[in-house]
Image (spheres, grey):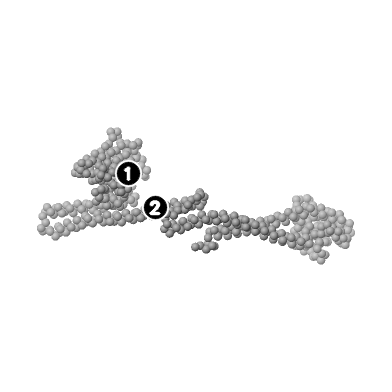
Amino acid sequence: MKSLTNSFYAKLSLIFLALILILGFSFSYISVRSSMKFMEETQQKVNRSLAEEMAVEFQPYLMDTIEADSIWSKIMYLNGINPQVDIYLLGSNGMIKDYYPSEDSATTLAINFVDVQPLDRFMEGEPLPILGQDPLNKGVKKPFSVAPIQIMGENGCYLYVILGGRKYDKTAGMIEESYILKNALSGIAIILILTLLVGLLLFRLVTRRIRSMSETVVAFEHGQLDKRIEINSNDELGQLGSSFNQMADTLVANLEEIKQVDKLRRELVANVSHDLRSPLASIQGYLETIQQKEDTLSKKDRTKYFDTVLRNTRKLNKLVMELFELSKLDAKNVQPELEDVSMAELIHDLVMQFKPLADNEQVNLKAQVPDTPLNLVRADIALMERALSNLIDNAIKNTPQGGQVIIKTINQGENVKLSITDTGTGISKENINRIFDRFYQADTSRSEEIGAGLGLSIAQRIIELHGATLSVDSILNQGTTFRFTLSPRPPINE
């Protein structure tokens, strides 16, 4: 069993949890930053005229000298209204001439000059917020209010008011820490709980399908070849399941085919061994007899024995040649040389060729060709003659004396349909589905019921090379019909 950390569900859940944490902290940070920006803008807008009002109050105490005590008195009064501001008197170049912090007079400056560019932008009425340097905190910028003022006869000076002084910083810091902590924790907790519950439930539903698919694949791997994935949707998982089912069907079919081929291979070995052993034993027996009775054997018997040896040798040669021919056809090493062929002429020649055999077997062999000319077809005449010869030979040999074999051809559109019908032994229902199986047919050369040898398998492959299909209809003890249709444009490469 897989450990928790190795399961797809656990990995997906951990990734989802990490994303939620990142999003939660990001949301809290953005919310706090946005709130602070909003507070700065609001504070600066509300106190925009504060410096102007102070400048009116302080100007009388800055004419000849800086009357700090008087200014402090005014500041103490104003601090009752807004006690959290730091006040600075700046020269025209931004140098700090004097300052009045909100916390205590012992506070030391961190910088001696203030950048006046933000101050000028403020007085020109640019959109807020505009942040300026905090002289008590180097590198820190805060919202401010500023107004022009004259200091000891120097024009262009500034009354610079930092709206968030140190006392404000301490108070705001305490409130901010509490605000951030409470809102961050509560916000993240709520988001995590709700989102995790919904997300994990959805992941559970998705991974349940994956687990089911995985169990099916494992079961199939361990030999339960009938297992298939249940398809309930057409999404990616459904398509994956369909692909697996198709692959499983193909594998099972291939496996069955391999089993069948292996079974038929064993049958072939047994059948071919029998077919080879019988004539070889006969040849050996007769040759040994000739050798042992060389002085006493009559010329007539010697000739008879040699004829038997020759006949069995021809049988062996025929079987070997058929096996070789069939193997070449199966390996697709034979490419038909197509040309326009008149089937009427080919059938006429074959009837003349097999007439002696049919007469010897007392079988009536005849061709039925229509009065109208037959269409020409594209075929390899040598291969087609071989296929038809096998079919005719098979029909004659399986037709009893007094029976007949009819070769019939008709036009069917631009095609030509051929059939070979006999009134012979027929083929049983049990065997008809295997009639073209080369391994199975290897045994039928000895069968009185079929007696087709390898000829039918060879005929079938040749006809398939011509883009046609050889079909068979048969009734046991009544007869058999083989038929196929040739086209002037077979679907094969010339």
Residue located farthest toward the bottom when viewing the structure as drawn: 106
| Residue 48: image location, x then y, percent | 80, 53
| Residue type at numbered disc 1 | Ser
Q: Nearer the viewer, residue 95 or 82?
A: 82
- Identify the residue at horizontal 10%, vertical 58% (top origin): 296
Q: Which residue is mark 1?
A: 471
**Residues at marks 2 and 1, CA–CA distance in whole angstroms:** 23 Å
Q: Nearer the viewer, residue 168 or 466?
A: 168
Residue located beneath label 2 in the image = 253
Q: Quadrant of residue 157?
A: bottom right
2 and 1 marks in contact (CB < 8 Å)? no
- In percent of width and height, residue 401 lies at 20, 43
> Depth check: 24 or 214 in front?
214
Whole-percent x, y for residue 301 in the image: 12, 54
Q: Which mark is residue 67?
A: none
Type of amino acid under label 2: Ala
What secondary structure is found at the residue carrying circle 1?
Answer: strand
Would you call the spot at circle 1 few (<14 residues within 10 Å), some (14-19), or many (20 or more)? few
> 327 above or below 351?
below
Q: Quadrant of the C terminus?
A: top left
Q: Is residue 6 above or below residue 419?
A: below
Based on the displayed image, in which of its 4 quarters is residue 197 positioned? bottom right
